[in-house]
Amino acid sequence: MLKAMEAPELPDDALMARIAHGDRTAFRLLTSRLYGPSIRLAAKVLGDRAEGEDAVQAALVKLWQSASRFDPKRGSVEGWFRRVVVNACIDRRRSIKAVAPIEAAADAASPDATPYEAAEANDRAARLHAAMARLNPRQRAAIALFHLEGATMAEIAEALETTPKAVEGLLARARTELAGMLAGTKE
């Protein structure tokens, strides 16, 4: 078993190897490293923090059950787990009957804005998030990973189990759909 003093020095792939052998301490440590970024990603993909937490919980169960199948030669633990989280979000999204709007916009009105400008900014953000909620799960995940998380095409491709070229097409279609949904609204 992993001793508490050894834990901080171990890289993620070493923790995965220990998890594959049933080491709960290694699982707790790796979970503490991956949880925050995964929750943020899942909340953005699903548009709801509670749904995102449920998706991450499902992904963590998968991590525990599939740790022995992780191959460090194929990529990082973080990238592998991001793909598991996105897949859990897509599965969760399919099971959700009503689509919840995305959380409030990150680009809220500046503190110097007039009440009118702040209201317009909030209205634009609400329309954008409502439109994003209508995208298909893969498009929404690609948009969230690229524009909100700053992930590269390669990282998105890994998370969505596709190629960087396919991600470019996915993003282009998502942007076109968003533009179509937002057409006719004032900027």
Image: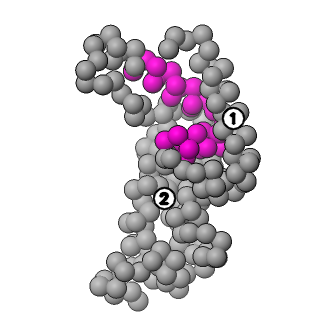
Q: Which residue is mark 2?
A: 57
Horizontal and vertical percent position of residue 31: 42, 67
For mark 2, does the 10 Å Cα neighbourhood hold few (<14), some (14 to 19), or many (20 or more) residues? some
Q: Is 114 above or below relative to 128?
A: above
Residue 173, located in which quarter of the rendered image?
top right
Q: Does residue 126 show up magenta in the picture? A: yes
Residue 42, image x, y percentages: 50, 48
- In primary-sequence order, the first of circles 2 and 1 is 2
Cα separation, mark 2 vs mark 1, equals 31 Å
Q: Position of residue 18 (x, y in %)?
A: 49, 83
Magenta portion: prevailing SS class: helix
Give the magenta part as a residue range. 122-148
| Residue 133, above or below 184 | below
Amino acid at circle 2: Gln
Residue 73: mark = none
Question: Residue at left 69%, top 42%?
Answer: 168
Q: Is residue 100 magenta?
A: no
Residue 172, numbered circle: 1
**Element class at badge 2:** helix
Would you say 169 lies left or right of 57 here? right
Task: Judge from the rendering whether residue 182 lies leftward or rightward of residue 169; answer left or right.
Answer: left
Q: Is residue 15 left or right of residue 98?
A: left
Q: Quadrant of the N terminus?
A: bottom left
